[in-house]
Image (cartoon, rainbow, N blue to C red):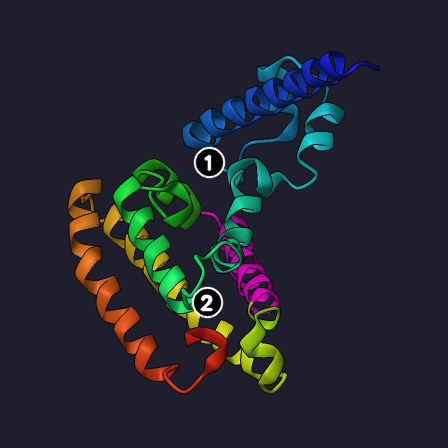
Amino acid sequence: MGIESMGLRESKKQETRQLISDHATRLFMAQGFEQTTIAEIATAARVAKKTVTNYFPRKEDLALDHHEQFTASLATAVAGRAEGESPLAALRREFTAALDARDPVAGFAGPDFARMVADSPTLTARLRDLHDQREEALAVALAETAAAIEASSIAPRAAAALLGAAHRLLFRRIQELTLAGRPNDVIAATLAPEAAHVFDLLEGALGDSPTATA
């Protein structure tokens, strides 16, 4: 198979994945996550049920379709930080950028989506699991820093626990304000000083940890 054919095939797969995701989101919003079946999604997207489950093995991932980007986000920020930039500084910078961009990965998903998640025990549990996975990925990234190699083995996990909890709090804060009916611009303006305070607290808490601040 030529490179061009492979590119077309991947493009077609991505289009199908997006089509399924779009129809699933529409149905979830209209009738609720728990009430919507895979069969209904397949019918709406005009594909087989097996096609839906091939692209999305878990029903929850149809709703939380940015899950891979979400779980990798903190680790990616640490791994891609500028030379001389500390992991904590990189995470602060990335969160500020996410606020400016109204990034869905940071929690800016709109009131309908926020309500759908809040009303679904399954999605709420899955989101907790994704937060845990994100923290674990961050711990691995911190453990790979030069400073961490010289520190104790527990240090990256301890730093990731604090950093992960802070990001979880900020995500929930965005969701909370969204459900309260605040527009995104107001949410971002509210979160900017709150997030700055959180990161200042983290700097104080992690000030002696080379894993996060070196």
Residue 183 visible within the image: no
Where are the magenta residues, as a range?
Answer: 119-141
| Residue type of the residue flagged with mark 1 | Gly
Mark 1–mark 2 distance (CA, rounded to whole Å)? 29 Å
Query: Picture coordinates of residue 81 (x, y %)?
Result: 45, 57
For the residue pair 138 and 42, the one nearer the viewer reads as 138
Q: Name the residue tied to disc 2.
A: 164
In this picture, residue 60 sits left or right of residue 202: right
x then y, percent, for residue 165:
42, 69
Q: Main secondary structure of the magenta part?
A: helix
Depth check, front residue: 181 or 141: 141
Identify the residue at image location x=20%, y=43%: 181
Residue 3 is drawn in which quadrant? top right
The amino acid at mark 2 is: Gly
Q: Position of residue 58 (x, y in %)?
A: 66, 42
Q: Is residue 119 above or below residue 24?
A: below
- Residue on which disc 1 sits: 32
- Residue at 53%, 58% in the rendered image: 79
Q: Position of residue 127 (x, y in %)?
A: 50, 54
Q: Is residue 165 visible?
A: yes
Indicate whether residue 134 is drawn in magenta.
yes
Report which quarter residue 193 is drawn in.
bottom left
SS category of the residue bearing label 2: helix
